[in-house]
Every structure is written in C-alpha cells, then in structure tokens.
Image (spheres, rainbow, N blue to C red):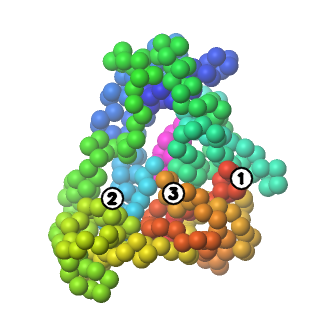
C-alpha cells in the first residue's frame, strides 16, 4: 500500500470480497513518511493490519546503484522495471508467504493462464490508464502465480468514485479521490535525476564517471562543433531538448561519445532503427520464440506497439526486425513483446 487511491481501493475491494487483508508499505527512501502516514490512515479506516517494511538498503543496492551504474555506462535505465521483480514484488511475495496468502497491488493489469503454453502472463486491461504491464514484464512465473489485481476491470474514474463513496482519506485528512496521481520516479522527488546521479557519483567516489558531468562539445554528424553540452549524463538517445546549438535545424541526440566527452546530434531520421538486439530476456506467456515469430513490441513505456518479427540468437539474445522504423530505441530501456494484449516476453535493448 503506497497510500495512494489505487492500492487503497484495491484493499477495500479485497475486504469486501471476504479476504483477510493486510497492508504492506515499503520504505524505499528517506522521503516516504507522507506515504506511510496515508497508508496507515487507510488501514485504520478499513480496520486492517498495517506492516511497514524498511527496505532502503536493498532499494539502494538493487535499484538506485543499478540506476546510477547504468547511466554512467551510457545506458538509459528504467528503475521501475528493475524494482518490481527484485524489490517490490520480492518483499511482497516474502510477506505473503509468511502469512500464507496471496499478494495484490493497485495496478491496472490482469494475470491470465495461456492455454497453448500453460504459462502465466500479464495482460493489458481496458482501464483507460496508460498501460502498466510494461513496467511489470520481468515478474517471474512464481510471482504471477500468487498475484491478483483487484482493479483489473475498473477505470480510474470508477476507482476515484469508490474511494469517495467509502470516505477514504490520507493522513492529512485529504480525500484520496482528490489527490493527484504520482508520476515521477519515487526516489527523485524534485525530478532532478542529474543531481541525484552527481551526488551518488561523489558519494561512491566514482572518479571515472565524474568527467561525464563536465561540459563538452556538441557535434553534428559530420564532426563539426555546433554548441556545448552541460555533461553527457544529462542526455539520452533521441532527446530533442536541453541543449543549445548554432542552428535552427530540429536536432536529436544520436550518440554520446564518452572518449571525447562529445554529444553527437542529428536529424530525426538518424534516430530511426529497423532492427535492434535484446538481451537479458524474461519469458512470460511464451517459453521461447520461434524464428521469425510475429508479434507487437514496445521500446519504451510511452511508445505505440509496432509489428515485428523476432529471431532468437545462439547467445540467448533476440534480434528484432520491425515492420517500420522505430524512434530512438535507447540501450538500457526495455523492449516488451505482446500478442492480443498479452505479454509474451521482454528484455533490455542492447
């Protein structure tokens, strides 16, 4: 229970369905007190037990350190993708096992058993929300087998209406139905991830990474300097804003050249790719791909699915050939494969 409207209404619905519900709140960072207070207030309202688990050390090691390491190595990480299987659902599974029960969250998703393969898979729902299955694709078969989503058939407006009807309010007594959704990375309160990376680089004494925080040249695709950047760590492939150049051309980040501390920019056509490689693959609805198998793929959470064909490689990676070029598939981001709204598999873009 995060203290938000989704997990709170999920708890309410489970209670109404006759489940014996226990709320679990994870303390992942120092700024979590407001969320703890909100979750505690909801649990008191529902008359259920509230457990608070301090997982800051594990979260630092498995999520924040991983996030920083990926950035300084030129990748574009998605911390939620890493956190869900290794921290959030791992701790939730542990607690559910201790209590001898199931686990549930307020995500807008569903779990389905695929008849053809006998495997469990996450499926998209018609919730009207931005799809949340993308962030959960790395959950294991064991985790999926003990997971239920009480909101799977609901839309966000319905959830807010249920919260209002039940009189659910946070620790500050503000109605949950009126509170805005949280959108940002949970451990970066001020949206300034560069400041966090800078602080972590200094704290850990990462001297090699410190140079990536220094300004350097912006080069066009012919190698001519057309401006200055504020530090390579501030940019990701496909980025269009955040740099000043001596041209009126609409330019995008094409490459980060760490050896020269140079940012290479170019036209939109230069960020389009028809083929990518995907590694560290987690299989969900499928146990494996057949060579040339057709499906849909998303190269980031906000991207539209694009038709593709998947070719397994001898090193367990996947070669993905898109039916049309996709924009800025950044190394470190996830490529998730779907068929009829069902997650087949997913992995990290090389």
Q: Is residue 252 left or right of residue 51?
A: left
What is the span of residues highlighted in magenta in the rendered image? 81-92
Q: Is residue 17 left or right of residue 208?
A: right
Label 3 near label 1: C-beta < 8 Å?
A: no
Residue positioned 23% across, 74% down in the render: 247
Number of other residues with Cα within 10 Å of mark 1, as a class: few under 14, some 14 to 19, many 20 or more: few
Q: Which residue is mark 2?
A: 68
Residue 45 x, y percent position in the rendering: 48, 12
Assign a secondary structure to mark 2: helix
Residue positioned 29% across, 37% down in the render: 30
Q: Which residue is mark 1?
A: 340
Number of other residues with Cα within 10 Å of mark 2, as a class: few under 14, some 14 to 19, many 20 or more: many
Residue positioned 47% across, 26% down in the render: 5
Please state which of residues 16 and 216 is positioned toward the viewer in this rendering.
Answer: 216
Q: Which residue is mark 3?
A: 303
Vertical position of residue 214 compared to residue 259: above or below: above
Tag in front: 1 or 2: 1
Assign a secondary structure to mark 3: loop
Q: Is residue 64 left or right of residue 23?
A: left
Please state which of residues 105 and 126 is positioned toward the viewer in this rendering.
Answer: 126
């Amino acid at each position: 229970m995060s203290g938000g409207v989704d997990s709170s209404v999920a708890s309410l619905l489970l209670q109404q369905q006759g489940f014996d519900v226990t709320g679990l709140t994870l303390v992942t960072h120092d700024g979590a007190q407001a969320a703890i207070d909100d979750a505690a207030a909801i649990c008191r309202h529902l008359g259920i037990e509230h457990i608070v688990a301090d997982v800051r050390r594990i979260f630092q090691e498995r999520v924040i350190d991983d996030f920083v390491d990926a950035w300084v190595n030129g990748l574009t990480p998605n911390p939620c993708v890493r956190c869900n299987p290794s921290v959030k659902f791992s701790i939730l599974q542990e607690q559910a096992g201790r209590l001898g029960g199931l686990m549930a969250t307020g995500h807008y998703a569903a779990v389905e058993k695929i008849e053809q393969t006998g495997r469990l898979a996450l499926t998209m729902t018609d919730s009207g929300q931005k799809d949340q299955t993308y962030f959960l694709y790395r959950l294991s078969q064991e985790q999926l087998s003990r997971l239920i989503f009480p909101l799977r058939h609901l839309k966000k407006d319905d959830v807010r209406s249920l919260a209002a009807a039940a009189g659910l309010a946070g620790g500050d007594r503000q109605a949950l139905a009126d509170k805005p959704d949280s959108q940002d990375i949970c451990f970066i309160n001020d949206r300034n991830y560069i400041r966090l990376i800078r602080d972590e680089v200094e704290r850990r004494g990462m001297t090699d990474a410190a140079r990536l925080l220094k300004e350097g040249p912006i080069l066009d695709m012919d190698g001519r300097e057309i401006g200055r950047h504020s530090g390579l760590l501030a940019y990701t492939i496909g980025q269009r804003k955040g740099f000043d150049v001596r041209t009126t051309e609409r330019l995008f980040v094409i490459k980060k050249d760490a050896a020269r501390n140079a940012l290479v920019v170019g036209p939109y056509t230069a960020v389009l790719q028809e083929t990518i490689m995907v590694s560290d693959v987690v299989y969900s609805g499928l146990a494996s791909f057949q060579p040339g198998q057709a499906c849909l793929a998303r190269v980031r959470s906000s991207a539209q699915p694009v038709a593709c064909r998947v070719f397994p490689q001898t090193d367990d990676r996947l070669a993905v050939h898109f039916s049309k070029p996709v924009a800025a598939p950044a190394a470190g981001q996830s490529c998730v494969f779907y068929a009829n709204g069902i997650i087949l598999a997913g992995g990290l873009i090389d």
